[in-house]
Image (cartoon, grey):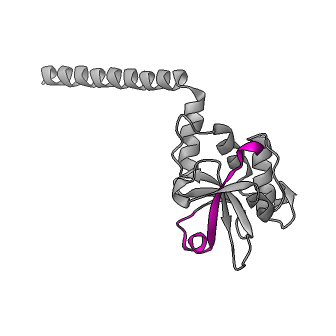
């Protein structure tokens, strides 16, 4: 009986030591991991877009910081912003590029891109209950885009959502002379 108890005690001690070493190894791995990888992983999960080593981390951080800002037609601040002002702000702060202030004028600055050829940072344009372009967003990948929605404020949406699928007009890539 004592022999079994000692064996059990020795085995439990061994398990506790092994678990402590594994936990320490995980902590060391986190300490040595590149902070950009941690941020990238977090933003990937939150935004539902697989960020790669080539992803523009500044773009995703900028969008993340604005998520939840209310929509305000004609607005251009954290108190309220519309879709074209949000897009203009992204291009100014992330890409150091000045673009126009309304979605139709922004479209005139782009080369049209098919939906299946969209790349991170491209623009997506919509004709919502209109014959002209009425909405713009910034494409992130995985059919997701960031925009200032009239109902949800600054948010992420999918081009596969029936509403956006119905009103999607074209993708656009800023003309090279403007970069």
The verdict on residue 170 being magenta is yes
Q: Position of residue 94 (x, y in %)?
A: 74, 41
Residue 63 seen in this snapshot:
yes
Quarter of image, res 58: top right
For the record, the magenta segment spans: 159-178
> In the rendered image, which quarter contains the C terminus?
top right
Q: Quadrant of residue 16?
A: top left
The one nearer the camera, 132 or 11, is: 132
Total marks placed = 0
Which residue sits at x=84%, y=58%? 101
Task: Give the residue drawn at x 76%, y 55%.
Answer: 109
Of 111 and 129, which appears nearest the observer? Answer: 111
Vertical comparison of 57 with 70: above or below? above
Quarter of the rendering containing residue 69: bottom right
Residue 60: where, in percent of width, then height? 65, 44
Please state if 47 lies on the left or on the right of 65 as rendered.
left
Residue 107 % position (x, y): 74, 60
Could you say which is closer to the camera, residue 4 or residue 142?
Answer: 142
Q: Residue at x 30, y 21 (%)?
A: 13
- In this rendering, position of residue 119 left or right of residue 7: right
Whether residue 70 is visible to the viewer of this picture, yes or no, is no
Residue 77 x, y percent position in the rendering? 86, 54
Image quadrant holding the N terminus, namely top left
Q: Residue at x 52, y 25 (%)?
A: 33
- Please state which of residues 68 and 55 is positioned toward the viewer in this rendering: 55
Q: Is residue 21 placed above or below 142 in the rendered structure? A: above
Q: Is residue 176 magenta?
A: yes
**In the rendered image of this protein, does residue 131 appear above or below residue 142?**
below
């Amino acid at each position: 009986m004592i022999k079994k108890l000692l064996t059990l005690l020795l085995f439990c001690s061994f398990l506790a030591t092994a678990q402590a070493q594994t936990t320490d190894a995980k902590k060391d791995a986190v300490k040595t991991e590149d902070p950009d990888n941690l941020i990238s992983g977090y933003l990937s999960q939150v935004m539902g877009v697989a960020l790669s080593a080539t992803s523009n981390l500044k773009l995703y951080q900028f969008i993340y910081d604005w998520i939840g800002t209310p929509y305000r037609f004609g607005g251009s601040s954290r108190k309220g912003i519309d879709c074209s002002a949000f897009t203009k702000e992204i291009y100014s702060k992330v890409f150091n590029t000045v673009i126009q202030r309304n979605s139709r004028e922004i479209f005139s600055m782009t080369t049209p891109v098919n939906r299946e050829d969209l790349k991170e940072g491209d623009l997506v344009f919509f004709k919502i209950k209109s014959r002209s372009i009425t909405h713009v967003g910034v494409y992130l990948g995985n059919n997701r885009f960031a925009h200032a929605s009239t109902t949800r404020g600054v948010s992420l949406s999918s081009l596969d959502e029936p509403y956006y699928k119905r009103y999607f007009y074209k993708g656009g890539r800023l003309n090279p002379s403007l970069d």
